[in-house]
Image: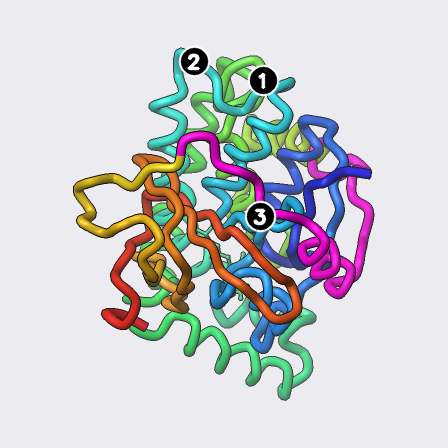
Amino acid sequence: MSELILHQYADSPFSEKIRAIFGFKRLSYQSVDIPAIMPKPDLIALTGGYRRTPVMQRGADIYCDTALIAEVIEDHSPENPVFRAPGVAQAVAAARWTDSEFFRVCVGLVFQPAALAANPRFKDPGAAEAFVKDRAAFTEGSPGLAVPLPRAEAVFREHLRAMDQSLGCQNFLGGDTPDILDFSTWHLCWFVHRQEVLRSYFEGFTKVDAWLERMRDFSTAPVANTISSEDAIAIAKSSDPGKMENPQIDPALGIDQGAVVSVLPTDYGFQAVSGALVHVDDQVIVVAREDERAGHLQVHFPRYGFEISPAGDKQ
Ligand SMILES: N[C@@H](CCC(=O)N[C@@H](CS)C(=O)NCC(=O)O)C(=O)O
């Protein structure tokens, strides 16, 4: 049985990014269905506060943010790489734009009134109200996730036009096989395309249509085995966190190893995780924490997009 556990929900685009990477790599994983809105007590037992979706678990090690999750999967299973030289710097930089700016554009499209009216999630007024309330709390303190509709429509179609040009010369944005940029772009196109009322945005982009079908094959590959959140917590409890080979702290931080810190995303979802600082380099932040139910844990974040402060400075 695979040791990789993805905590996710079906409608989540960032989860779809990781599901498709697993499918492309033909890598089996275990899946825990998590709630789309708070409360998420079993997820929080593992992360210590981080509530965004998805989260990946390997034993007592918890990985936050798909930028890091994709790299951990690549290290675990390097066959069918999604980070490939020589274009890796361009792909990672473009994937960052896609997962942040293009995401906001797609949120603008998916949350327009016509799409909300057709979305089964919003048929029940109580469920719709709970969702809206949850997302207002989730984005509190950030500029908000949705780009206004007229601008979202223009940017979306402009980007599809550029993609259509690229895909006229090659099967994937990454070349003959998909790379990380394909997966970042796929999950957002999937987010829009799965809603019939929004499908007209894709009209005329025939190369993009063909690419969508190629990408869909990865996402539908049967690679997941579902387990309960209680089972995932029991797995964490019975595991030891992985031993870091050469733990170090970036001296520029001026924070000692073992000091209690808070880690917070810089863009939205400002729910801090507190723990003892284990390791910080240019790529990752690792903190150790303890949970009554899940035991000793190590929580990992990408360095890019997260900030560390001495605990108490920020909550
Ligand atoms: N940069 C994050 C973004 C994750 C994200 O925004 N996920 C959305 C769902 S797709 C989310 O967390 N929504 C609120 C929630 O699920 O509680 C990543 O790459 O993992």
Does dot 1 land on a helix, a strand or a loop? loop
Disc 3 designates what residue?
61
Do the CB atoms of the residues marked 1 and 3 lie less than 8 Å apart? no
Give the image location of residue 165, x and y in percent. Answer: 43, 23
Judge depth for marks 2 and 3 and give the one in front: 3
Residue hosting label 1:
177
In this rendering, the answer to whether 223 lies above or below 200 is above
Ranked by sequence position, the earlier of labels 2 and 1 is 2
Around disc 1, counting alpha carbons within 10 Å, would you say few (fewer than 14), some (14 to 19), or many (20 or more)?
some
Q: CA distance from mark 2 to mark 1?
A: 13 Å
Residue 153 at x, y percent in the picture: 40, 52
Q: Secondary structure at mark 2?
A: loop
Is disc 3's CB within 8 Å of ligand 1?
no
Three-letter amino acid code at the position of disc 3: Asp
For the residue carrying disc 3, how many other residues have a C-alpha within 10 Å: few (<14), some (14-19), or many (20+)? many
Residue 186 is covered by the magenta coloring: no
Which image quadrant is residue 77 in? top right
